Amino acid sequence: MTAVPPVSTGELFGHRPFLLYFFARGFAELSHLIAAVAIGWQIYALTGSALALGLVGLLQFIPTALLVFVAGHVADRYDRRLVVQICQGGLALVAALLAFGSFGGWLNAPEIFGAVVLLGTAIAFDSPATASLLPAVVPEGALQKGTALSTGAFQVAMIGGPAIGGFAYGVTPALPYALMATFSLFVVILYAAIKTDRPPAGEDPPSFAALFAGIGFVRRNPAILGTISLDLFTVLFGGVTALLPIYAQDILHTGPWGLGVLRSAPAVGALLMATLLSRYAIKRRVGMRMFQAVIVFGLATAVFALSTSIWISIAALAILGAADTVSMVIRISLVQLSTPDAMRGRVSAVNFLFVNASYQLGEFESGVAAALLGAVPAAALGGAITIAVALLWMKLFPALRDVERLE
């Protein structure tokens, strides 16, 4: 078997399908985060209720939970580019309605909640199609670097989106939604220009078994099951995002600027690591490297939990973000490479459901643990559990631990 020559970052960006995908992914995430800031500010301004803010996340998650398996089947059965274009067009339409309502002064909380449900529905279909399209737009042998670069685009959006959204909302509440509508339409144009050679899907009619085939495929493949479940428990117990306001005010004794820096630190670390991985791919013992990254994630979480210095806390969060990126790039690449193209949409849907559930439940778990134990013990315990999960998964999933290369 002839080895595939490595693809440089420059060659990857010179590959037109990936270049279009890279910018489309970045602008899609940017538009979503801009709108998320605006929705949060506007809901709180209209209601003054913390419960209403919590409902925003719940209402966006419900469509994912209800439609994720249908969305995965759609991504496998139909042209994934077309699926993403329809979803992004729907997002642009909803954003335009929010912009007009904000500009006209007639938008109220129930209408925003309704828009959030529509946004969640579009994202539920968009995410599996977007994720399963990545292997089709990178040259052979370049999936790991392509994953790292697309993760970098996501992290740039994580850093810039909230800042742009906050500034735009300060100009006028309608502006963030107008930006989202514009960027979403731009994403539609970018996906329309992508050309792939994906073979047409089969003509078998949809069935109950086909809808849930992704779950069966994951259960039958220990490496994929271990990868997805490791991600679930790492985020569920190791996340500290929900506790950052407590740390900023009561432990690190800093103001809003400090909270902003703390929130940005993981994304900055993740972006730097994504840039490094886009140039220097992990070539050996990738399974062990993933577990090592999760252990570093847990250790950095524990250091952050015990720190009373804002600079040590910022450094710990940056290391946490960098370690998570190493794990994420390997996890995504392993799942994509271990899944046949005809199943990628449904497997990506299962992964998307697990990740979303872990983020939502993880914030809830952090809040409950902090209320019962205090913020510092809760965060430290989360780091310790993350390390324990990594060590346990190394024993439970030896096939995942022993993965040598991403091929």
Image (tube, rainbow, N blue to C red):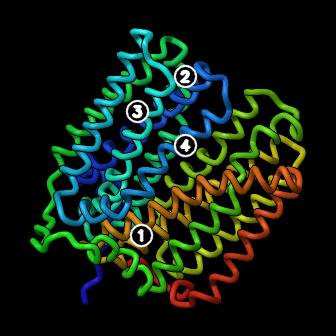
In three-dimensional space, the C-alpha distance between marks 4 and 1, rounded to whole angstroms, equals 28 Å
Q: What residue sits right under mark 1 in the picture? A: 333
| Image height of 183 relative to 315, above or below | above
Residue found 88% across the figure and 51% down from its top: 374
Q: Quadrant of the N terminus?
A: bottom left
Q: What residue sits right under mark 3 in the picture? A: 115
| Residue 182, picture quadrant | top left
Residue found 63% across the figure and 84% down from its top: 394
Q: What residue sits right under mark 2 in the picture? A: 42
Q: Which of marks 4 and 1 is nearer the N terminus?
A: 4
Q: Do the residues labelled 1 and 2 touch (CB within 8 Å)?
A: no
User: Which three-letter amino acid code belongs to the residue tagged 2?
Assistant: Gln
| Residue 254, picture quadrant | top right
- Whether residue 117 sits left or right of residue 390 in the image: it is left
- Whether residue 85 sits left or right of residue 270 in the image: it is left
Q: Earlier in the sequence, mark 3 or mark 2?
A: 2
In three-dimensional space, the C-alpha distance between marks 1 and 2, rounded to whole angstroms, equals 38 Å
Q: Earlier in the sequence, mark 4 or mark 2?
A: 2
| Residue 115, picture quadrant | top left
| Image height of 181 relative to 304, above or below | above
Label 3 SS: helix
Label 2 SS: helix
In three-dimensional space, the C-alpha distance between marks 1 and 3, rounded to whole angstroms, equals 33 Å
- Whether residue 124 sits left or right of residue 292 in the image: it is left
Is there any visible trace of residue 134 in the rendered image? no
User: Which three-letter amino acid code belongs to the residue tagged 1?
Assistant: Ser
In three-dimensional space, the C-alpha distance between marks 4 and 2, rounded to whole angstroms, equals 14 Å
